[in-house]
Image: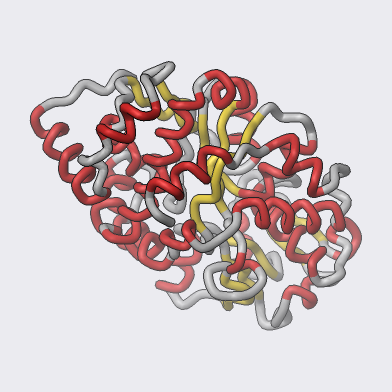
Amino acid sequence: MRIAQSRRQFLTTLSWAVAARVVDVPAALAAEGPLETTTVRFAKIPGICNAPQYVAEELLLAEGFTEISYVGLVAAGAPAVDAVARGSADFTVTFAAPLVIGIDRGAPVTVVSGVHIGCFELFGNESVHSIADLKGKSVGVQGLGSSQHVFAAAMAAYVGLDPAKDIHWVINPSVKPTELYEKGQVDAFLGFPREPQDLRARQVGRVIVNSAADRPWSQYFCCMLAGNRDYVSKYPVATKRVLRAVLKADDLCASEPSRAARRMVDRGLTPRYDYALQALTEIPYPKWREYDAEDTLRFYALRLHEAGMIKSTPQKIIGDGTDWRFLEEVKRELKV
């Protein structure tokens, strides 16, 4: 999909650019040198919390990209990681724990930054009051290896449970985990936006852990920006500009959540504006300035190693699958 600007698109671009304060970047762009490519493709993921990669579209235009596309239609987590690893997409904003598993398995992806915290919530019935109470209980997930399964397994491992032995994972191809939970067919499930917003609106269920507020989960990124290893290696200027646009889009999601929510609905990425607005308001997007992306990967690598889901040490995960140079440069520019 080639982005061709109409007058309306130009005004939208300018509006977003002014809001993100990128109209004064020509000097920075000149210092970086020319883009090695003006094309960038993101894995298209339906959902709400990865809004920054969609809000970043106009900012990417301001950064000099002319062909910006959102390709495929994949679930967040392992499918998005696989799309980037295959080269079907150049970048994705997706969950940290599945990225760790992908890197452990040799996926050629490079994590360049954290994006935000706080998008998942653990719901339980009256028999579940803490993560430890999941022992012997049933937990609904989309599938083994899904984002729900990986995050819930990491949480279980953190409190000393063996996710493979202590939890009964319930998979029903025809019924979503949230529906199984509502019907009382599972004791717990892990929800991502818009599921928590919908359940709370209808006063259904109990929140056991909110990753935006409850430690230690609130101290680490849930979603990160990762690129195809070849793209990051061959196109360092383009990679830095992609990162800068996504992080500025983070700030826009916080400062103008109503516009970001409308963008997600208009693109068909989520059906309800009210739930999108609520989620974007609740997720603390500006926290990217305060948190350490490397600590996030170390934390989840430890948890997944404890759960027996990866073999690599945290040091190997970080060594094989990250490049923080771009983040350090952008932080210096933005005086973070």
Q: Position of residue 15 (x, y in %)?
A: 16, 45
**101 horizontally vs 273: left or right:** right
Q: Is residue 324 left or right of residue 33?
A: right
Using residue 245 as the reference point, say whether residue 210 is left or right of it. Answer: right
Residue 179 makes an appearance in the image: no
Q: Residue furthest left?
A: 7
Q: Is residue 264 visible?
A: yes
Q: Position of residue 256 (x, y in %)?
A: 26, 58
The residue lying toward the viewer, choosing from 213 and 77, is: 213
Quadrant location of the C terminus? Answer: bottom left
Where residue 153 sits, quadrant-wise, is bottom right
Q: Residue at x 86, y 57 (%)?
A: 306
- Along the horizontal axis of the image, is 122 left or right of 152? left
User: Looking at the image, which residue is at 27% across and 23% down?
Assistant: 3
Q: Quadrant of the N terminus?
A: top left
Q: Position of residue 148 (x, y in %)?
A: 65, 54
Picture residue at 22% right of the left edge, 43% below the top: 17
Asked if residue 24 is positioned above or below residue 178 in the image, the reply reads: above
Q: How many marks?
A: 0
- Give me the residue at 53% from left, 57% from top: 192
Q: How is the image coloured?
A: secondary structure
